Image: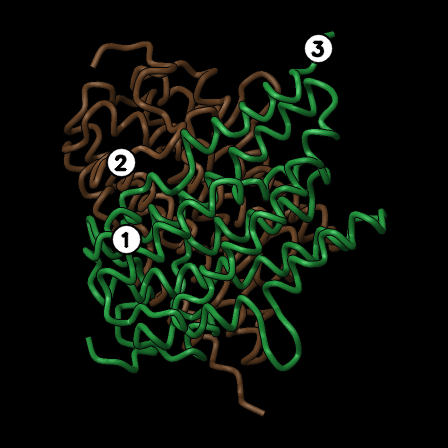
Chain colours: A green, B brown
Amino acid sequence: MNQPQSREAFEQRLRDIGAERYHDKHPFHAMLHSGQCSPLQVRAWVINRYYYQSRIPMKDAAFLSRCDDSDLRRAWRSRLEDHDGELEAGGGLRRWLKLAEAVGLDADFVASARGVLPATRFAVDAYVRFVRDMPLLDAIAASLTELFAPKIHAARIEGLLSHYAFANETSLSYFRNRLQEAPKDVAFGLDWVLSHADTIEKQDAAADALIFKTDVLWSQLDALYSAYVEPGRIPPGGWDGTEGVTGDD
Amino acid sequence: MNQPQSREAFEQRLRDIGAERYHDKHPFHAMLHSGQCSPLQVRAWVINRYYYQSRIPMKDAAFLSRCDDSDLRRAWRSRLEDHDGELEAGGGLRRWLKLAEAVGLDADFVASARGVLPATRFAVDAYVRFVRDMPLLDAIAASLTELFAPKIHAARIEGLLSHYAFANETSLSYFRNRLQEAPKDVAFGLDWVLSHADTIEKQDAAADALIFKTDVLWSQLDALYSAYVEPGRIPPGGWDGTEGVTGDD
């Protein structure tokens, strides 16, 4: 039987997956962060990315529903709290809708998910299903794209503030908060995966789960790019830039 | 309570969905059928479309597994037989692999699904899940894209024969067979949906299911176009045109 990789080598393997495949390398992000996106493109990004955000608490609830270890549940529950927030204050989702309003979109329209591209739905729903159906180790490993998120969030805050009138501390509060929240989540998840993937088979499965998750993220940007940048062909029934728009360009 | 649409009006509504949203309108098909696809693009289409084909019997088996009406099961079972075929002769899937070989691909590589785009997987898997999870009426309604298939298959046979050296009666036998098989399937499915969607709510659900299915098909071609035509950006880990290629360009 093959020996498992050392903890250090396995962690490096996971980090290499991010270096090769994380969506910070997607050209849509280069456009967005350097001020090259039109109002239509920014809005399309906000609408489609909100669908991903909106499914994260459902994904985490699916995880909790399968988890019979109370300690693990307690550690994981903060993710739900971060995104959904308290009864009055709201959490990450409400902060994301502040961004939607700032870019000239009706928050109820964005929350309705009516403008979301089918390919975005397919990718995001695949992630929720993955967490519902696969071993817990794989589900936690898939969350480790958060290892690579603080860097992109910091670049996004800086890029949006420099280039877009809608950007300010209120509209970007989602990303600012994530800079605090994500590191504690990912430190826990990474330690759990490194400790529990104690055979080469489990290490391979965890690496595959992380690759799967990078596919989920990349596919969303490919769909956005295809519809709203190049070739710029909006699929049948897709959002054409009019419904739900409240602001001027 | 709202009255249901008449049988004729409801059928027209379903046909209008195809007229507006079926993937025969996708520019990739115009390229393919008019001889404008490079060998790489033809191969990428064959690889990705095979994944869809390969999931159709699984989708139909999921349908059968949920169906407690023996008459309906018997009528539906011929779909499995068409695609999987008999023990020795094989069926639609084996015919598709003939096409794979004719365009210069290793059949085992295509069958392995290693070259398939993540977005193709997400869309196709969403369809299998839909049929596994949704009401039988919705599952059957989703199959009614076959109403629109004979026209595209006939155009494809004619277009491929005119423009590509790989095209002959053996390599295109999948499409030739579908010209015979699809009309009997869809006549049964259409009659079933028209008869069982006896409230406006069920008619709406059936129409939504057919729209969902057109999204599944369209998304696959958008992903293919994005990766291999314009912008021509192959996602991380995506097939780059080398693995599994046996023929010359």
Asked if one can make out residue B19 in the rendered structure from this viewpoint, the answer is no
Question: Chain ID for label 3?
Answer: A
Q: Name the element at disc 3.
A: loop
Question: Chain ID for label 1?
Answer: A
Q: Are marks 1 and 2 in contact (CB under 8 Å)?
A: no
**Which residue, given by chain and number where applicable, does mark 3 sit on?**
A3
Q: Position of residue A97 (x, y in %)?
A: 45, 73
Whether A37 is drawn above or below B9: the answer is above
| Residue closest to the eye, B234 or B123 | B234
Q: Would residue B71 be found to the left or right of residue A226 on screen?
A: right
| Residue closest to the eye, A169 or A247 | A169
Q: Which mark is residue B233?
A: 2
Q: Amino acid at mark 3?
A: Gln
Q: Would residue A217 be found to the left or right of residue A167 on screen?
A: right
Question: Chain ID for label 2?
Answer: B
Q: Amino acid at mark 1?
A: His
Whether B33 is drawn above or below A170: the answer is above
Q: Position of residue B237 (x, y in %)?
A: 40, 27
**Which residue, given by chain and number where applicable, does mark 1 sit on?**
A33
Q: Which residue occupies 31% across, 72% down?
A: A103
Asked if one can make out residue A69 in the rendered structure from this viewpoint, the answer is yes
